[in-house]
Image (cartoon, grey):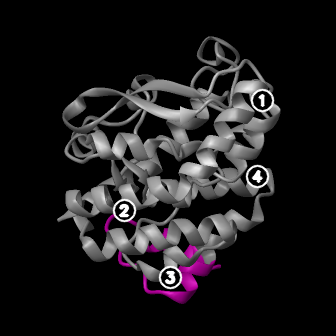
Amino acid sequence: MKRFLDIVVSLIALVVFLPLGLVIAVILRATGEGEIFYVHPRIGKNGKVFGLIKFATMLKDSPNLGTGDITLRNDPRVLPFGWLLRKMKINELPQIINVLKGDMSIIGPRPLTPQNFDYYSDKVKKAICRMRPGLSGVGSIIFRDEEKMVSDSHLPCREFYKEYIATYKGELEMWYEHNRSLWVDISLFFLTVWAIIFPRTHLIFRLFASIPQRPLSLVDEENRRGDRSLVRASKDASGIVEITTAGRSADQSEVLKS
């Protein structure tokens, strides 16, 4: 059923967005370095590497420049028109082709680069490899401003990703594998659209009471940077719903509620 819905939704999306895609292709060809698509290796189901397709929004040699496959906010490698596409997440539209090919699903864990994949524990790696990666998912929604988080950190970008992002995102993908269903996928699909329209939304924490809450280490890091909106997400979620996530201590709950 999931694969059938992936194909149906992707075909509809392909027809709807094809005119927009053609306009974008013309603009990309006429600006920047003239590239339209960017294909990058990602880890797929069963650990198979596939080529993730995006609109070209960065310099062609970006993987070998600066922070490599980790993109920062206001990254100088991003082209002017590419910035607009990334801001609106339109650069991800060509991945509809990946879904039709069977490389990806509409909802699932975001496909990781081989280097970032190595930052996850063996348990999380096995869980991720049991699922088709998705255009969006629980990790994408909660870490929708990941570039800003990495950019604002006092740590080197790879160290911050490994210590803070990979750990928590791994918990989120494990949660998804344990709870995935048609209802969860439909909810995450509409939450993705909601998050694009309302970037500061914390609705996902209200809708799913069992979703892992932000670890104290990440909350402390966000608090140190003065990122109050993300800290409030944890506090609000704890105050509105009963948190049932396994493994979080009572002390953590009290800190987040204070």
SS at badge 2? helix
Res. 26 image quadrant: top right
Local SS, label 1: loop
Q: Mark 3 points at which residue?
A: 206
Up/down of 232 relative to 87, above or below:
below
Q: Earlier in the sequence, mark 1 or mark 3?
A: 1
Amino acid at pointer 3: Arg
Q: How far apart are marks 4 and 2 (CA)?
A: 42 Å
Confirm whether residue 67 shows in the render: yes
Task: Mark 2 or mark 3: name the one nearer the start of the chain.
Answer: 2
Locate residue 242, reporting x and y percent. Answer: 43, 86
- Mark 1 or 3: in front is 1
Query: What kind of residue is marked 4?
Result: Arg
- Number of marks drawn: 4
Q: Name the residue under label 1.
A: 79
What residue is rendered at 29% in x and 39% in y? 103
Query: Which mark is in front, 2 or 3?
Result: 2
Where the N terminus falls, by quadrant? bottom left
Q: What residue type is labelled 2?
A: Val
